Amino acid sequence: MTDLDTHLEDRLLAALPSDVDYASARHVVERGSRLEVRNGVVEPSATAHNEGVMFSVWVNGGAGYAATSDLSVEGLALAVEQARGWAAATAGRTVIDSPPLLHTVGEYTTPVTDSFDSLSLAEQVALLVDADMALGGHDRIVDRSASLVRFDIQSLLLTNGGGRVAQHIRQVFPDLRATANEGSNTQNRTFGAGNYAGQGGVEVLTRHGFRDAAARIADEAVALLDAPNCPTGTMDLILAPDQMVLQIHESIGHPLELDRILGDERNYAGTSFVTQDMFGSYRYGSELLNVTFDPTVPGQMASYGFDDDGTPAERIHLIKDGILERPMGGTISQARSGMAGVANSRASSWNRAPIDRMANLNVEPGESTVEELIGGIEHGVLMETNVSWSIDDSRNKFQFGAELGRVIENGEITHIVRNPNYRGISATFWRNLSGVADDFTVMAVGNCGKGEPNQVIRVGHAAPHCRFSNVEIFGGES
């Protein structure tokens, strides 16, 4: 630590009140950068620095939070005074009598095998220039871009009981996009809708073949212009991992957030069709469905050693052999509900209090090959890369669209189709899971919104190819 960091930690510790049941200071520094090349032009680069601290205070059954970017002794003291004031105002009015929070000691750092320090800014721009050029290899490509977004996040959680959790997270979002047009027909193809992202360094660019993907993306965008519309009917559906990301996120992730199940989200993003009495017995999907909450996966977007309340992270099954076992609820929601949960109290920044959020939520691989999934279909569609989504306020009925479809006839892929869409009801859909491949692609979502005031957070999803039976599939406008 630098002298400045050491002095800040001393000031934070000095500001923590000792005459309360629990108090914490969570200091966060987030540095971000963005590089983009669009249509052969290097766009202005952007950098950002965001820093501050949030204090939480629990006393006499009341809880209060206050945040500040003023890291002086006076600024910290004022924030603590405000947090104490809210704790006094809520005393006797909270749903739990005492704080269940821990005084954890530990550290976590993102594993990096190839640091971005090995690439100069000019080399990073040159990489994007080459990708942008490869995206423009057809006359019918009318818009294209290659970009690289990075975040470097350092956090320090201190408590008045001797807790100290220091974490350093490095996140990387590479992206490629191509738009093809002919007359009134416009088609887009992307690098996994921006979801081929994760923690690490330069190695994140190679995990999904960023350097070689641009030409393929351009070819597929142009091919979609000439492709027929997706067929309509009830048939089998295979979702590629980059479409499974959205399916997991919306129809498993959000419904299983415990604070949502307890009713906290009904004013913003809806509730959940899941109720507390379902856990331990409810059949969420077929026996092939196994879903884990796992912040311990190296390189996945939401990997960490501890959540923002200091709870140690561990891998836990939420759904096992299709049966719903556990919700995603942090220590406070667990105390409220009397249910076991996971280490998922997460805040989007220093000026937001932790709430129940997804982290790495993964569908575990099965035992079939992708070829075996395809070979078992008489008539169906394989869909890749999410492009649209709509789901009701209980996270039950949904309608999703993908960038590209591949028609399957008699166990073989025959041709691509454009505007593929499908709809269903969450429980029915997952119970129709009829095949899970043995591949496993680690991906991410960078814009998950929840909470009032709003918190946009980055989460991880990993999945294999999955096959579903009796799905309502339809095409868009031709």
Image (cartoon, rainbow, N blue to C red):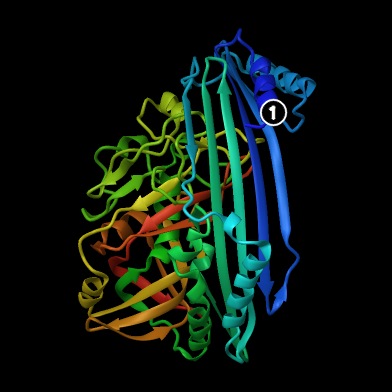
For the point 22% across and 49% down, the residue is 321
Q: Considering depth in this image, is 112 or 266 the residue closer to the camera? A: 112
Q: How many marks?
A: 1
For the point 55% across and 34% down, the residue is 354
Reply above or below: 74 against 202: above
Would residue 387 be visible to someone looking at this image? no
Q: Sort mark 1 into few (<14), some (14-19) or many (20+) by Cα contacts within 10 Å.
A: few
| Image spot of residue 314 (x, y percent) | 36, 37
Quadrant of res 233: bottom left
Furthest toward the front, the residue is 118
Q: For the residue labelled by badge 1, is the local secondary structure a helix, a strand or a loop?
A: helix
Disc 1: which residue: 3
Furthest toward the top, the residue is 19
| Image spot of residue 257 (x, y percent) | 44, 41
| Image spot of residue 101 (x, y percent) | 48, 22
Reply above or below: 415 against 405: below
Reply above or below: 222 against 124: below
Q: In this rendering, would 178 be left or right of 311?
A: right
Quadrant of res 369: bottom left
Mark 1: amino acid? Asp
